Amino acid sequence: MKTLGIYIHVPYCKSKCNYCDFYSVTDLSGAGRYADAVLLHMEDYQESAKGYDVDTVFFGGGTPTCLPADVICRILNGVKDHFHLRSDSEITVEMNPATATPAALKKLRRAGVNRLSIGLQSAHDSELGVLGRIHTFEDFGKSFADARKAGFDNINVDIMYAVPNQTRRSLRETLEAVTDLEPEHISLYGLKIEDGTPFYKIKETLALPDEDTEAKMYFESIDFLAEKGYRQYEISNFSKPGKMCLHNLKYWNCDEYLGFGPAAHSYFRGFRFAYKKDIRAYVEAMEYPSRKPDILSEKYEIPVSERLGEYVMLRLRLTEGVDEDAFAERFGLSFERMFGKYLRLYTENGFMEKNGRFYRFTPKGMFVSNYILSAMLDFESELISGVADGTDR
Ligand code: SF4
């Protein structure tokens, strides 16, 4: 039986953080109707997903725990009603500190949610204030303790580096405070100033670390987390043994998943598609099905060239890297022959390494992976169009 991940986008937040470009709104008045729309939407895939076992469900956002726990449970029951949900599935809900009561957490756990992902970002309230977060570190500590009491034994904590005014020391203090609590998983993201965010408007005035300091923050964090027993398995993700996020691994392994909600993406039966960032249009399209084509922001069948590029890009995000044999089996091409000049260049300069059949980034390569991947993939698309033309092989 093939497996499938389900992603449910919950586009609500109590307030918007200064750096965030995820799609969410702060008016929760339509949340009940939104949940109904998501359930209606699931009906569309009930037939086509019949040959699949759903083994991961991920409620992301936004802030899913802005919704009453009953509403999350109702959507989760919808997943159970419309798809074949395996009994050992990983079911994750993202939450922010102070957005779920102990009773709500217990309700979620009883309904089958078995993983929480808590957005902390920093253990320093001054840094949280700059980011526009609406919680304190103390709120986080309480939510973490409540989650443990409710029976959650698989918790991720999000941490951010390269925050304005952050120092290597203050980042280290955040890492110490978080690892003292022993979550099973830690995500460590570098702040990016995205267009359209409040930070973007004042980016010249932000006291951001220089590139050298940012790199040191990243490398020192990797070392610190390794000492504490967290193995890096992806550019930004670290886990205790056996606690990798199975849902996110689907994205990086190019496995299939279905997304529900505005801004949600899917990869299903050879197609990639996504919905517009517009809750109202999404809800109305589910209530008046003739409007459904209008809410797609993209839909296309993935050509071989793109599949290959995506595979390389996503697999190299993982510390395991690209398996030459798996690549040859999947695409009928030699990874070394295709990318030889880059593999040699980056290996000689310490950005990549070869471990048995696997080519992978070193930590130094991970830090600049965007640049390396864009060079490799530009070259790959030229090569693929050459193959398609029959001009090169
Ligand atoms: S809580 Fe999360 S999704 Fe909401 S605005 Fe902040 S970072 Fe974005």
Image (cartoon, grey):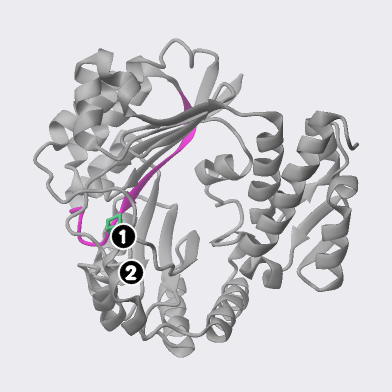
- Quarter occupied by residue 174: bottom left
Image quadrant where one finds the C terminus: top right
The foreground one among 55 and 236 is 236
Amino acid tagged 2: Tyr
| Prevailing secondary structure of the magenta residues | strand
Q: Is residue 180 visible?
A: yes
Instruction: Report, in whole angstroms, how far the alpha carbon at label 1 lies from the one at label 2.
Output: 6 Å
Residue that mark 2 sits on: 200
Q: Residue 90 colored magenta?
A: yes
Mark 1 CB near ligand 1 (8 Å cut)? no
Provide residue 329's location: percent of width, then percent of height: 83, 32
- Quarter occupied by residue 341: bottom right
At label 2, counting other C-alpha atoms closer than 10 Å, the crowd grade (few under 14, some 14-19, many 20 or more) is some
As helix, strand or loop, the secondary structure at mark 1 comes to loop
The foreground one among 369 and 73 is 369
Q: Which residues are magenta?
A: 85-101
Image quadrant where one finds the N terminus: top right
Q: Is residue 196 left or right of residue 36?
A: right
Instruction: Residue at 25% x, 33% y: name it.
Output: 73
Q: Is residue 318 visible?
A: no
Provide residue 57's location: percent of width, then percent of height: 42, 35
Instruction: Residue at 83% x, 34% y: name it.
Output: 387
Residue that mark 1 sits on: 196
As helix, strand or loop, the secondary structure at mark 2 comes to helix
Residue 57's place in the image compared with 116, above or below, is above
Provide residue 390's location: percent of width, then percent of height: 87, 30
Provide residue 264's location: percent of width, then percent of height: 38, 37
Amino acid tagged 1: Gly
Q: Kindly indicate whether the residue at mark 2 contacts the one at mark 1 (C-beta within 8 angstroms).
A: yes
Image disc number at residue 309: none
Q: Residue 367 colored magenta?
A: no
Instruction: Residue at 32% x, 47% y: name it.
Output: 61
